[in-house]
Amino acid sequence: MPTIVDSVIVPNRSTFLTYPPFSRRTLFPELEETGPAQFDPATDLTVLSCVVHPPFKMLTAEGIANHLAKEKFLPSCLGLREATAIQKRGLDMFRAILINLQLDEIHLWRSVVADTKSELPREILFGRGEHYLPIIKEVGGAVIIEWKKFSECQWFKFVDTVHFTALLPQNIKH
């Protein structure tokens, strides 16, 4: 694991989040401002947890998002605020997090957006318009946040989701 000095990550919750131009609606706006004021994944290796969810009948982003919402996992997931703070800390910090979690990238389920302004409830909104899942990952030696269409996301066996351990629903094994 890379050596990290001053490893505390502080998401800036006082600024407006910037979404891509195709974004017309955040699906979980009530969760965007939630989460810890700061976290230290380098010295407290238990602050973040990777939860492996069992195979779904259909491994689609829509199915996973519905599962996470129904089972009350979304509030503990990482979002765009945390990803932006991690990105600002640089590649060594990001790699240290990935090594600890044994992942290649982190899906930011709390920050899913839609390309429609429809006021329909989000349960009905799935299947109408396109939805995008932000993903923080390393590309060419840089930490980037990529927005991937739900229709382009594929999982074949199981789904790993990253959570703040202290915010996980009770009785969850991680």
Image (spheres, rainbow, N blue to C red):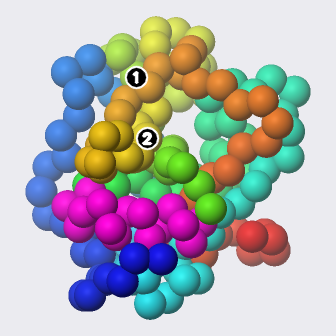
Bounds of the magenta segment: 85-101
From the viewer's side, name the closer residue of 92 and 146. Answer: 92
Dots 2, 1 in contact, CB < 8 A: no
* Magenta segment, prevailing SS (helix, strand or loop): helix
- Estimate the x, y position of residue 57 in percent, counting from the top left: 87, 27
From the viewer's side, name the closer residue of 30 and 98. Answer: 98
Q: Residues within 10 Å of mark 2 (few under 14, many from 20)?
A: many
* Residue shown at 76% from the left, 55% from the top: 52
The residue wearing badge 1 is 114
Residue 108 visible (yes or no): yes
* Residue shown at 33% from the left, 27% from the top: 25
Answer left or right for 161 relative to 94: right
- Estimate the x, y position of residue 114 in percent, counting from the top left: 40, 22
- Estimate the x, y position of residue 148 in percent, counting from the top left: 44, 26
Q: Quadrant of residue 35?
A: bottom left
The residue wearing badge 2 is 135
Answer left or right for 72 relative to 35: right
Q: Amino acid at mark 1?
A: Ala
Q: Amino acid at mark 2?
A: Ile
From the viewer's side, name the closer residue of 60 and 98. Answer: 98
- Estimate the x, y position of residue 16 in percent, counting from the top left: 14, 49
Magenta stretch holds residue 98: yes
